[in-house]
């Protein structure tokens, strides 16, 4: 149980002053009192915003962050050459090392303001491609890592069946593969049992339309019946769009919407290369796109056509994907600034009611990010939800002197991690124990030392 007094805190309708929020034994909000004037509280917070959902991550890839920028002078570096390096890393991860990497990553995510993460998890089998006796051994390690550091997790066991359109999987992909829909559904159901043990969320998904055939895609979509959030990579690279045209006769999004029932429960990762028709298919059907501007920039994917998508009132949120960058504010800024550079206009984020950049972007990443993790919400803080918030340094000079209508913009556009004092999930301050942090760092260093020459 906790009792928090917030001098200023951000709700969906705007900043509120003097709010008391109490939690039950599980860290869920059981009371919100506005215009609070009493002294019955335990923790006083001067300035708070809600914790931020991260809607797309591949935890193991954190181990290669910063290690793929020393390019060959003679050979071109692109997404596909990066992917080879990523496969080499994937082949070298064992359950213990995955847990250690994920613990370090999730603790750094919390430090950067993410309070929940959606793990798009396709590394299922051992180094020979054989099943572990616990089918979801590696997925369970992610759940343990998340629980240990205190981040909420939605685990998505991913269906991966083939190496490309009409192409058997490659040896480097053997750890990812389910040989049939039945085999994948069995893995999903085992994962569901495990996720329940950890009181976490689950989603369902396929890696991409190149990684499963039409029949299998339909079987998984029918099996799900919109029960769990359905995630898939969609149009990240021009090469995969061209291959889709060649093998399926149409672009990825058109193919998807003309063959299956796709709606508000579908979350399309990296909808980078969309035609106008595809954009409308996504928005008319009220689906969501998960943008990962830092990774998309790092991997030279391309630029998302934000203006067209916004004109159609499309839903979007963010993810850290390869985890080469962990700042949610940087994801927003990069999306915005890429668009400004392209259009020579500064007002990227706007709708019929407002053109307040920070407020519009924050609402999008919060509301759609929660849908992506299978947890729809109507306000940033509400009864029954876990109390997740960021304690912002109100003495930071820019923040201290900002006005109410600009305060969120000041936090998002002009400050960084140094202005985030503490991150709370379930009403508990995270990352506080220095000896735990020291042990985590030592474990991490040892793991990286052993897999560095992958
Ligand atoms: Zn991804």
Image (cartoon, helix red, strand yellow):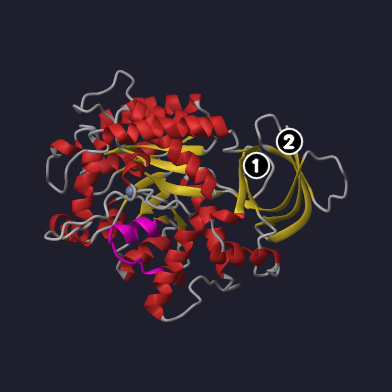
Which residue lies under the disc numbered 1?
A: 387
Please check the rendered image and state whether residue 397 is part of the magenta-colored stretch, yes or no: no
Disc 1 CB within 8 Å of nearest ligand 1 atom: no
382 horizontally vs 100: left or right: right
Above-or-below relation of 272 to 4 = below
Instruction: Determine if residue 232 is in view.
Output: yes
Badge 1 vs badge 2, beta-carbon distance below 8 Å: yes
Quadrant of residue 407 in the image? bottom right
Locate residue 115, reporting x and y percent. 54, 44
Q: Nearer the viewer, residue 194 or 76?
A: 76
Q: Is residue 296 magenta?
A: yes
Q: Which mark is residue 62?
A: none
In the image shown, does 427 or 449 lie closer to the viewer?
449
Q: Which residues are magenta?
A: 291-307
Q: Quadrant of the N terminus?
A: top right
Q: Residues within 10 Å of mark 1 (few under 14, many from 20)?
A: many
In the picture of the structure, the residue carrying the numbered disc 2 is 2
Residue 39: x and y in percent read 87, 43
């Amino acid at each position: 149980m906790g009792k928090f007094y917030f001098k200023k805190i951000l709700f969906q309708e705007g900043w509120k002053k003097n709010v008391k929020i109490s939690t039950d034994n599980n860290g869920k909000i059981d009371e919100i009192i506005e215009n609070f004037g009493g002294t019955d509280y335990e923790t006083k917070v001067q300035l708070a915003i809600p914790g931020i959902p991260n809607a797309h991550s591949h935890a193991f890839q954190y181990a290669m962050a910063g290690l793929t920028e020393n390019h060959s002078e003679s050979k071109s570096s692109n997404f596909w050459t990066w992917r080879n390096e990523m496969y080499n890393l994937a082949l070298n991860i064992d359950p213990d090392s995955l847990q250690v990497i994920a613990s370090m990553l999730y603790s750094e995510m919390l430090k950067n303001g993410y309070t929940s993460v959606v793990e798009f998890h396709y590394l299922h089998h051992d180094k020979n491609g054989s099943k572990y006796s616990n089918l979801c051994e590696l997925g369970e390690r992610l759940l343990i890592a998340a629980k240990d550091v205190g981040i909420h997790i939605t685990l998505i066991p991913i269906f991966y069946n083939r190496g490309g359109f009409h192409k058997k999987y490659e040896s480097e992909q053997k750890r990812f593969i389910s040989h049939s829909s039945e085999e994948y559904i069995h893995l999903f159901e085992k994962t569901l049992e495990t996720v329940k043990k950890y009181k976490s969320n689950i989603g369902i998904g396929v890696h991409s339309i190149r990684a499963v055939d039409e029949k299998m895609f339909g079987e998984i979509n029918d099996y799900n019946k919109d029960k769990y959030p359905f995630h898939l990579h969609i149009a990240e690279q021009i090469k995969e769009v061209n291959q889709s045209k060649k093998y399926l006769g149409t672009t990825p999004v058109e193919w998807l919407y003309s063959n299956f029932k796709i709606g508000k429960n579908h979350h399309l990762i990296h909808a980078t290369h969309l035609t106008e028709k595809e954009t409308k298919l996504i928005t008319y059907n009220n689906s969501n796109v998960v943008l990962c501007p830092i990774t998309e920039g790092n991997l030279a994917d391309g630029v998302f056509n934000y203006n067209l998508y916004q004109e159609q009132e499309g839903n979007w949120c963010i993810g850290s994907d390869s985890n080469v960058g962990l700042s949610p504010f940087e994801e927003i800024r990069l999306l915005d600034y890429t668009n400004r550079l392209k259009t020579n206009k500064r007002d990227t984020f706007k709708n019929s009611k407002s053109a307040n950049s920070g407020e519009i972007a924050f609402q999008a990443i919060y509301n759609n990010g929660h849908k992506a993790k299978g947890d729809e919400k109507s306000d940033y803080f509400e009864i029954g939800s876990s109390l997740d918030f960021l304690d912002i340094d109100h003495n930071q000079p820019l923040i201290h002197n900002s006005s109410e209508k600009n305060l969120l913009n000041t936090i998002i556009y002009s400050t960084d991690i140094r202005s985030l004092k503490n991150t709370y999930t379930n009403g508990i301050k995270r990352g506080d124990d220095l000896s735990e942090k020291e042990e985590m760092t030592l474990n991490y260093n040892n793991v990286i030392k052993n897999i560095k020459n992958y």
